[in-house]
Amino acid sequence: MTDFVVAIDGPAGSGKSSVSRASARALGFDYQDTGAAYRALAWACIERGVDPQDPSDVIDALETFEYSIGIDPDDYFVRVGSETVTREIREPRVTTMVSAVARIPEVRAYLVELFRSIIAASTKPGIVVEGRDITTVVAPDADVRILLTAAEEVRMGRRSAELPGESAETTARQLASRDAQDSRVVDFMNAADGVTTVDSSDLDFDQTVSAVVSLVHAAQTSAESTPH
Ligand code: DC
């Protein structure tokens, strides 16, 4: 079982996924993207004709939800049953439905346990886990807890660069509306006690990864110098 957990939360467009994955790679750690599970469940509902807005049907769908994710940062995949859905879960039809699924308390309770079992199954020296409630609910005792933020206009600019087919206005509207819906369920805009905020507004990608890696090295050094 891994003995070093890095918890990273933040809003959409903060660069959380790519920064977490690159940090894990630099550290020789595993990487768990938790948003992928909410997306995979929303995808499974859509495919099976389950209305993601109907909590009791979504809860029933959990019983046959067979989810797996690659946690090696160099071998990322998401599967539902035997179907690989790595790309499909990023489609707009899933993105617009995912908040409805993520706000169901039974879904959250189920997935939180699943995330913990995936953390426990890691055999690397550590794991970087990213999402919205990792620092507060999934792994509140993590060795390093980070809130990765960026100014709203910076996040919108980055998201829009990732989706060249969409107009900047559409992307901005969708991002603001998803943040508004998601932040009613978990507060990922304000750092909880003991959580370090890394504001990437004025940092490029490599500088943001370095900031995360430095926080991990500092925590490892202080753990080594603290007598047990
Ligand atoms: O990070 P993402 O965009 O892939 O997340 C997809 C959705 O899942 C997002 O709308 C919020 C939700 N989510 C959550 O509620 N808790 C998490 N730990 C991760 C994601």
Image (cartoon, helix red, strand yellow):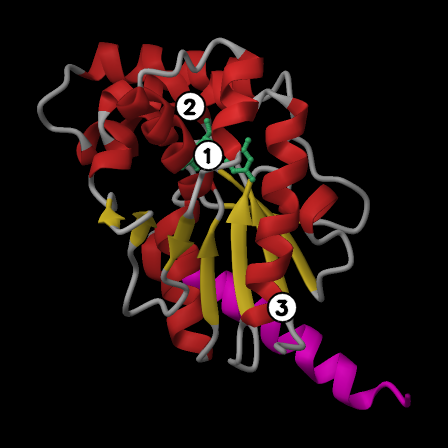
Q: Is residue 158 visible?
A: yes
Residue 201's x, y, as percent?
43, 39
* Residue that badge 1 annotates: 38
- How far apart are labels 3 and 1 at the CA level? 20 Å
Which image quarter is the N terminus in? bottom right
Find the magenta span and give its range: 209-228
- Circle 1 packing at 10 Å, graded few (<14), some (14-19), many (20+), is many
Kind of residue sitting beneath label 3: Ala
Helix, strand or loop at label 3? It is: helix
Between residues 86 and 173, which one lies in front from this camera angle? 86
Q: Is residue 96 above or below residue 146?
A: above
Residue at the image point whose x is 57% and y is 75% from the top: 126
Q: What's the residue type where badge 2 is placed? A: Val
Q: Position of residue 52 (x, y in %)?
A: 43, 15
Residue placed under numbered mark 2 in the picture: 98
| Residue 202 makes an appearance in the image | no
Judge left or right: residue 220 versus residue 149. right
Ligand 1 neighbours mark 1 (CB distance < 8 Å): yes
**Magenta includes 204?**
no
Q: Nearer the viewer, residue 140 or 55?
A: 55
Is disc 2 surrounded by few (<14), some (14 to 19) or many (20+) residues within 10 Å? many
Mark 3 → mark 2, Cα distance in angstroms: 26 Å
Task: Give the residue number, with chain letter if any, for mark 3.
Answer: 120
Residue 17 circle label: none
- For the residue with label 2, is its CB less than 8 Å from the closest atom of ligand 1? yes
Residue under the image location 45 percent in, 41 percent down: 37
Q: Which image quadrant for residue 118?
A: bottom right
- Is the residue 10 above or below the residue 23 in the image? above
